[in-house]
């Protein structure tokens, strides 16, 4: 994070006065638009979420024929038809008809409201290696080699142009968050990254009442006094000055957030997402915690100066028994009363209006099932772009007839026709107009599917 800006923003906003927010009478205005990147490591099979319709003599018929085992159904047309009719909503944008898994009820509500764009035939990496392709996606750079680990992420590059901070809501910040190092074009910087692994425990340790004289309490008090004294005696140009400054600024930052959140009880519905035994508990308690972190970060938006947030939901490498694993994940994220539905119900409309979510993984899956009721790594993929300001619809041909010719090949892929530069660049433009040419300087040369126009992605 830019700590001097952080302190100025916190003081200017009256944070120490404990402004009421969200659940109270008033709340600070979310001054800027915010991008939330939701990484799905492992490579999600969005064809399972959104399959073609079951109709004889169509691409859809052949899709169900080669995908039946991944749905854990018999290889018979009657079973495919029953699965299509019973377990999927039948949706259309006027030109393309597709299914949407009924367990993703919130996503259907957003689609019906025109707030979901489905971008198809995206080039998902240049290999089938998870680590390499996750790095490529986080950097937004298809030319990145396996050893280019030090380069900045595109979220970090965006805030370096737009201002503000990237909030890493995951247990460990992803490389997506790191910005460019002005001294090293092959390096990165975390100067504008705020790590929020647990927003309700972000303050440096301080003893609870009655525990001041415990060993941890005495140690905390001693360290606070030590750093304060060191800061007073240390020369401003000392190479060690940044350490004592960081301690002071981190202490102030944590105390400011803690004071704010004391005025805003966490909604019970959000707490339930990561609480075992609650009515809306997620299977992935960790992702439930990230929803809490995002909610709290928006409550404290004037303190943290959020422009970009990073989330991650694992468990998408479905080589075996795909139906059980992927549908549990999809319900956690997109089900009624689950992660995103709960979050949007708790956010004021004027806050939700300034958010856009990008949901996708490092690559997709192959067109047909494997021998273990699952699917294997595939290059091409789709992304979901969700938000109140999104102009919903299907972008790119969702089920190209040319796929029929590849179904008999050993490892048939979705063909990637659109590169990251165009999709991610359009999101950058929405967050900060004029930023995409700096974040993605090679956008003009990047591949783009014929007839696709991402400049119309938002209202």
Image (tube, rainbow, N blue to C red):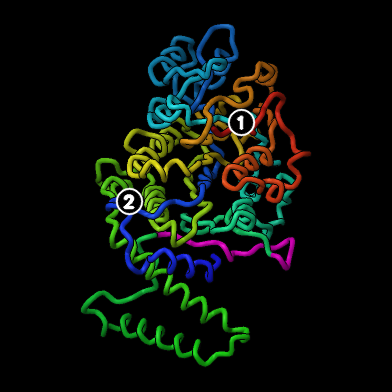
Q: Position of residue 413 (x, y in %)?
A: 66, 29
The residue where tag 1 is placed is 456
Residue most toward the top? 56
Disc with the residue nearer the chain's start (1 vs 2)? 2
Q: Callout 1 environment at 10 Å: few (<14), some (14 to 19), or many (20+)?
A: few
Helix, strand or loop for disc 1: helix
Circle number at residue 22: 2
Q: Nearer the viewer, residue 314 or 139?
A: 139
How far is disc 1 from disc 2 in space, using C-alphas? 32 Å
For the N terminus, the quadrant is: bottom right
Q: In the figure, 149 relative to 315: above or below?
A: below
Q: Is residue 187 magenta?
A: yes
Q: Callout 2 environment at 10 Å: few (<14), some (14 to 19), or many (20+)?
A: many
Q: Position of residue 113 (x, y in %)?
A: 43, 27
Which residue shows up at 55% across the image and 28% down it?
371
Q: In the figure, 5 relative to 378: above or below?
A: below
For the C terminus, the quadrant is: top right
Residue most toward the right? 445
Question: Would residue 411 be seen by someone viewing this image from the given angle?
Answer: no
Q: In the figure, 301 relative to 399: above or below?
A: below
Residue most toward the bottom? 233
Circle number at residue 398: none
Which residue shows up at 27% across the image and 52% down it?
25
Q: Is residue 343 left or right of residue 174?
A: left
Q: Nearer the viewer, residue 257 or 72?
A: 257
- Part of the protein shown in magenta: 182-198
Which residue shows up at 32% across the image and 85% down it?
218
Q: Is residue 265 left or right of residue 380?
A: left
Q: Is residue 110 left or right of residue 421?
A: left
Q: In the figure, 184 relative to 357: above or below?
A: below
Helix, strand or loop for disc 2: loop
Q: Position of residue 71 (x, y in %)?
A: 46, 24
């Amino acid at each position: 994070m830019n700590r001097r800006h952080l302190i100025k923003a916190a003081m200017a906003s009256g944070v120490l006065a404990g402004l009421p927010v969200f659940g109270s009478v008033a709340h600070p205005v979310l001054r800027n638009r915010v991008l939330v990147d939701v990484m799905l490591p492992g490579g999600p099979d969005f064809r399972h979420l959104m399959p073609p319709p079951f109709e004889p003599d169509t691409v859809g018929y052949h899709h169900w024929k080669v995908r039946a085992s991944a749905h854990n159904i018999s290889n018979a047309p009657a079973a495919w038809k029953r699965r299509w009719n019973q377990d999927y909503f039948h949706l259309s944008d006027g030109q393309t008809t597709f299914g949407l898994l009924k367990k993703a009820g919130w996503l259907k509500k957003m689609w019906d409201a025109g707030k979901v764009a489905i971008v198809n035939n995206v080039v998902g990496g240049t290999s089938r290696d998870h680590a390499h392709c996750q790095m490529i996606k986080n950097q937004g750079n298809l030319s990145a080699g396996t050893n280019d680990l030090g380069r900045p992420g595109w979220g970090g590059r965006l805030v370096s142009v737009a201002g503000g901070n990237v909030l890493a809501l995951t247990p460990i910040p992803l490389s997506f968050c790191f910005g460019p190092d002005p001294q090293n074009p092959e390096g990165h910087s975390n100067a504008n990254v705020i790590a929020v692994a647990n927003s309700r425990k972000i303050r440096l340790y301080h003893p609870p009442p009655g525990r001041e004289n415990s060993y941890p309490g005495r140690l905390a008090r001693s360290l606070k006094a030590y750093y304060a004294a060191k800061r007073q005696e240390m020369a401003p140009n000392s190479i060690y000055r940044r350490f004592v400054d960081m301690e002071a600024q981190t202490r102030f930052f944590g105390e400011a957030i803690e004071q704010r959140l004391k005025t805003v009880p966490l909604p019970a519905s959000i707490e339930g997402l990561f609480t075992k035994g609650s009515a809306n508990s997620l299977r992935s308690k960790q992702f439930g915690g990230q929803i809490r972190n995002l909610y709290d970060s928006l409550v404290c938006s004037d303190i943290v100066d959020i422009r970009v947030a990073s989330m991650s939901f694992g468990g998408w490498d479905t080589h075996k028994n795909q139906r059980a694993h992927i549908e549990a994940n999809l319900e956690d994220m997109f089900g009624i009363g689950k992660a995103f539905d709960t979050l949007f119900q708790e956010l004021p409309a004027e806050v939700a209006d300034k958010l856009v979510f990008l949901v996708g993984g490092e690559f997709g899956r192959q067109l047909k099932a494997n021998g273990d009721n699952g699917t294997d790594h595939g290059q091409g993929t789709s992304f979901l772009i969700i938000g109140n300001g999104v102009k919903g619809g299907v972008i790119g041909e969702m089920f190209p007839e040319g796929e029929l010719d590849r179904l008999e090949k050993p490892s048939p892929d979705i063909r990637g026709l659109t590169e990251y530069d165009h999709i991610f660049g359009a999101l950058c433009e929405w967050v900060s107009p004029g930023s995409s040419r700096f974040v993605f300087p090679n956008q003009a040369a990047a591949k783009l599917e014929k007839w696709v126009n991402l400049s119309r992605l938002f209202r």
